[in-house]
Image (cartoon, rainbow, N blue to C red):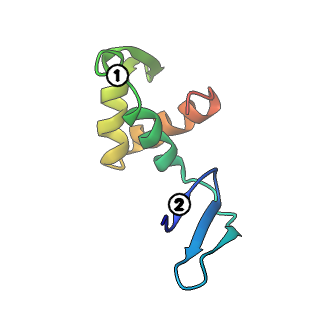
Amino acid sequence: MKSGLVRKMGEIDIYSRSYNKKIMVKVSVPIKEKDRFLRAYSNLSLGLRNEIILVVDHKPITWNVAFIEINKNTKPGEKILKKLIALELI
């Protein structure tokens, strides 16, 4: 029996073991920007993580550099995150 299966954004199926019924609950919680980045980053192959994706302040940014900056919550990390969202890369 499944319990707490997460499907599309904001939809959760909950199964009651005692009544053997499925209850659908819709939750409207937007995915945070950092979580969107981490989801995209985790799905990249190791080779792609070294590719340049942005230029911020005349510096090339790879997925790996973006990961480090965003995880450390630096100001360049905030710029990188905003640009990735604006370019719809995440």
Q: Which mark is residue 45?
A: 1
Q: Nearer the viewer, mark 2 or mark 1?
A: 2
Which quadrant: the C terminus?
A: top right
Above or below, 45 against 68 in this view is above
Name the amino acid, label 1: Ser
How many other residues sit within 10 Å of disc 2, few (<14), some (14-19) or many (≥20)?
Answer: few
Vertical placement of 55 versus 22: above or below?
A: above
Image-based side of 7 in relation to 73, left or right: right
User: Where does residue 82 sit, x and y in percent of width and height?
Assistant: 56, 38
- As drawn, 50 above or below 24: above
Q: Nearer the viewer, residue 34 or 21?
A: 21
Q: Which residue is mark 2?
A: 5
To which quarter of the image does residue 67 belong? top left
Mark 1 residue element: loop
The reply, left or right, for residue 62 in relation to residue 17 is left
In the image, residue 32 lies at what x, y percent?
Answer: 54, 53
Residue placed most toward the observer, 84 or 46: 46
Q: Residue at x 58, y 53 (%)?
A: 31
As rendered, which of 33 and 23 lies closer to the eye?
23
